[in-house]
Amino acid sequence: MTMISGYKLKEGGFLQADILLTSSSKRVRPSQIPSFKPDAGSPALRAHAVAGLCQKILVVNDHFAIAFAGDVRSIQAVVRLIERLVDEHPVLTGKRFSDAVLADDTIDSEKIRIIALSFEEDEIHISNVYADCGHRNENFELWVGGSGAGHVKAHYQDYPRHAFDVLEENIVVHGTCMALDQFANHLKSEFENKYKSESIANLFGGGYEVVAFYDGRFQKISNIVYAFADAELDAEGMLQVDFPKCLIKSEYKGEDLKIRSVELQFDEDFDEYVPVNDRTFTIAPISRYEETTVEDDVDELRFRGHFLCFLINYKTEKGAMTIPFIKKYENDLYFLYKAFTASVEPGFAQINYSDIFRDEVKDHVLGFVEQVKTSFNSK
């Protein structure tokens, strides 16, 4: 699917986007995606193919950022228009931009969906071209575009009203974590189910972009680690968290988005975990999407970062539930101290959870389960 969204959380502004380029042509050679690598006998998508990967968010300058969905050639024409507009006058407002797009006869605007964020007169504004208005309340305003727009609407509608009433100093982290929560759950679903009963309308591909306004400018969120692991209580009531089944790291290097994805499987012969399908994607902006590449067994990206999205598959006698643990860390060193260390090399994988992480995850899981019980009993 293609999915873009832009939202205001109180005084904060955010953009989200997937990275998939899709095609209805069966002649297109399918592109690899970060969320999983299909086996030789895996079923394919029914109607479309993943034609490539690219960045769909463009940070034009400190005070203007934009997300695209739709026809690639039309989007590239919009990028060229933006360059001309900025050359004419460096201050780009939402109205000036959207008026210029709709007035340009060389752009088939009906084939694209655009959401733009601008910082004008000390306030964030959202403008759009053929995007749809989503969920909103006194603290939140959402706009969506693309075939996956319904997923975004459903995600934010599931939050209770008080979740949008956050302190000013927490807006950036809270708004970013809301986006990462959605992405992490889609990643887990794709990793576990792969193409089984999938259509392109449900496929995200395992790569996402988030832009937030902080420190006076729009910036892409970098250094994100995703992990998925099973967990259950032992006989003493202690939460035991297994080795992650999958690790994904997302980080920007210059203008390129780098994503490293690796599966961890248990080797019974050697009684240890080994990495499988360790791939690093270099994903270019949409203006030069042909330059996107994928390499095997490259350790350029290490599994540490500023944001952690750890999805716990909590197993009980009655079944299992997915519990997200999403947290912001000050820097890589704090991540290593408060979360975990991960060493992944060809033929070798080692994960060491910190005591702080184990305690925080236990409290989070048990608290989440208690909330679910309370909610169920109140119905």
Image (spheres, rainbow, N blue to C red):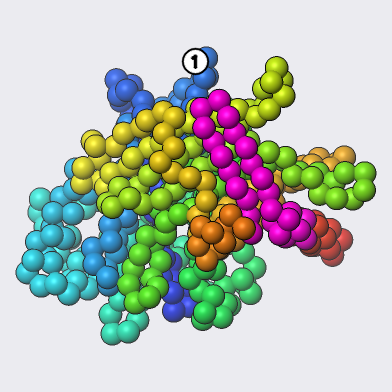
Decide if residue 43 is on the left or right side of residue 129. right
**Secondary structure under the numbered disc 1 in the rendered image:** loop
The quadrant of the rendering that contains the C terminus is: bottom right
Q: Residue at x 65, y 29 (%)?
A: 273
Whether residue 155 is visible here, answered yes or no, is no
Q: Which residue is mark 1?
A: 40
The quadrant of the rendering that contains the N terminus is: top left
Residue 332 locus on image (x, y percent): 51, 57
Q: Residue at x 64, y 41 (%)?
A: 351
Q: Residue at x 23, y 63 (%)?
A: 60
Span shown in magenta = 338-363
Residue 280 locus on image (x, y percent): 41, 36
List the single residue furthest toward the left.
88
Whether residue 358 is visible here, answered yes or no, is yes
Residue 349 locus on image (x, y percent): 59, 34
- Position of 30 relative to 11 (above/below): above
Q: Name the residue nearer the viewer: 154 or 204.
A: 204
In which image quadrant can residue 263 be found? top right
Residue 237 locus on image (x, y percent): 90, 50
Q: Residue at x 42, y 56 (%)?
A: 222
Q: Name the residue nearer the viewer: 240 or 324.
A: 240
- Position of 54 relative to 152 (above/below): above
Assess disc 1: are there few (<14), some (14-19) or many (≥20) residues with their C-alpha within 10 Å of its C-alpha: few
Residue 343 is covered by the magenta coloring: yes
Q: Name the residue nearer the viewer: 23 or 50.
A: 50
